[in-house]
Amino acid sequence: MQNLAFILIGLGLLVLIGWLAKDFFMADEISVFIRIVVGIIAAAVLMLFGIAIKDRIAQSKKDDFTGVDN
């Protein structure tokens, strides 16, 4: 049940971020240069986040100390 709550919260955040991003990128008051720069920065942050998650999952699969308590 807790996982379902986390999934719903995550989906809600994604919808909110998408709605805000649509408004930002469609606004005529913001220059095209600023919109392009923000888009590039957002893509770079997402790529770094994805790489970090991938590395963390790969590391946890080969972790020899998963059952050891302190």
Image (cartoon, helix red, strand yellow):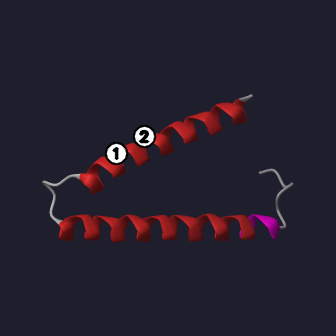
Question: Residue 15, percent across and down?
Answer: 48, 41
Find residue 5 and report its image quarter: top right
Position of residue 29 in the picture relative to residue 1 (left or right): left
Quadrant in the rendering for residue 60: bottom right
Of helix, strand and loop, which mostly describes the magenta segment? helix
Q: Which mark is residue 67?
A: none
Q: Position of residue 17 (x, y in %)?
A: 41, 46
Image point (27%, 70%), residue name? 37
Inspect the magenta stretch and tell me whether residue 60 lies in it.
Answer: yes
Q: Which residues are magenta?
A: 59-63
Residue 45: quarter of image: bottom left
Which structural element holds mark 1? helix
| Position above or below: 57 against 12 | below
Circle 2: is it few (<14), some (14-19), or many (20+) Cα within 10 Å?
A: few
Residue at 34% x, 45% y is 20
Q: Position of residue 57 (x, y in %)?
A: 71, 64
Q: Amino acid at mark 1?
A: Leu
- Magenta stretch containing residue 4, yes or no? no
Q: Residue at x 56, y 35 (%)?
A: 9
**Would you name the residue on which mark 2 appears?**
16
Residue visible at 84% across and 67% down in the picture: 64
Tell me the crowding category of disc 1: few under 14, some 14 to 19, or many 20 or more residues within 10 angstroms, Cα based: few
Residue 15 or 4: which is nearer the viewer?
A: 15
Q: How many marks?
A: 2
Q: What residue is pinned by disc 1?
A: 20
Q: CA distance from mark 1 to mark 2?
A: 6 Å
* Element at label 2: helix
Instruction: Tell me the quarter of the image containing the N terminus.
Output: top right
Amino acid type, callout 2: Leu
Tell me whether circle 1 and circle 2 mark residues in contact (CB < 8 Å).
yes
Name, please, the residue furthest toward the top: 1
